[in-house]
Amino acid sequence: MLYIGCHLASSKGYKAMGTQAVDINANTFAFFTRNPRGGNAKSLNMKDIEAFLEISREHSFGKLVAHAPYTMNACAADENIRRFARETMADDIQRLEATPGNYYNFHPGSHVKQGADVGIELIADQLNTVLRADQTTTVLLETMAGKGSEMGRSFEELREIINRTEHSEKLGVCLDTCHVWDAGYDVVNNFDGVMEEFDRIIGLERLKAVHLNDSLNPLGAHKDRHAKIGEGFIGADAIIRIINSRYLKGLPFILETPNDIDGYAKEIEFLRKNYSE
Ligand code: FE
Ligand code: FE
Ligand code: ZN
């Protein structure tokens, strides 16, 4: 079964996202838990959530991959920014219990001149404050392109964060194909080698979701600019090999390509056509 979807706007609620996913032949999706610029999340509407869960069961959706606001920086130098990150994550994790057992993906953060070691400590501190033994959501560290002082640019950095996290059983990794390519992992010519390295350093059991994107830049560019499938340096052939990889069977694939909803529908159709069970 190929679980594939894209980012959907959450402003109209869960049921609207579920209906839109079905319309474009998606069976998973991503959404921002609140305005990406931060601010308060809307209060939960349990009737809306019930209606969504019904759609999700009826259409056998895979796990959802909620996305934390990208302005959240767990390893900022400024204590106020770190507090905002902690409070936002704690609140999001609590709210996500209304739709139990899904994923919550976040960008580990930028260490802004404090150095990667301090960055790792601060990110683990946040996770140690926020993660709860009884939560059903798995929190995913996203692999990053390594733009500026961005953390998560290597599998080793993610491993260090996991090592320092007490409730590491609540942690997984979301592999962003554009980001790892930009970070220097050659997913075009040696995808199996990248997966073997992931397994050696992090462990494949931690790999829970994939952000499926082409990249506007060449290998190792550390830029992070997404392209439509087949319109970047990764290319359609490599992306088709990735969705069919034996290492990624059953994982949710989320498109974050620069598209409107019709563009997403076309990419989903193209990828389904090129997937073999
Ligand atoms: Fe992201
Ligand atoms: Fe991503
Ligand atoms: Zn990106």
Image (cartoon, rainbow, N blue to C red):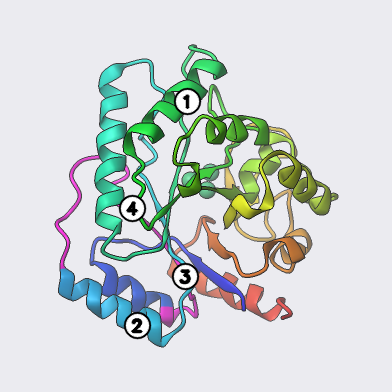
Horizontal relation, residue 36 to residue 256: left or right: left
Label 3 CA crowd tier, 10 Å (few <14, some 14–19, many 20+): many
Residue 95 position (above or below residue 5): above
Q: Which residue is mark 4?
A: 134
Could you tell me which secondary element the residue under label 2 belongs to? helix
Q: Residue furthest bottom?
A: 58
Q: Which residue is mark 1?
A: 110
Labels 2 and 4 touching (C-beta < 8 A): no
Q: Amino acid at mark 2?
A: Ile
Q: Earlier in the sequence, mark 2 or mark 4?
A: 2
Horizontal relation, residue 225 to residue 76: left or right: right
- Between 48 and 35, the one lying in front of the other is 48
Residue 69 position (above or below residue 53): above
Q: How many marks?
A: 4
Q: What segment carries the magenta color?
A: 22-45
Could you tell me which secondary element the residue under label 3 belongs to? loop
- The residue at 28%/42% (across/down) is 90
User: Which quadrant would residue 38 be assigned to in this image?
Assistant: top left
Q: Which residue is mark 2?
A: 55
Q: Is residue 38 magenta?
A: yes
Residue 36 position, x and y percent, is: 32, 44
Q: Is residue 91 visible?
A: yes
Labels 3 and 1 touching (C-beta < 8 A): no
- Between 85 and 17, the one lying in front of the other is 85
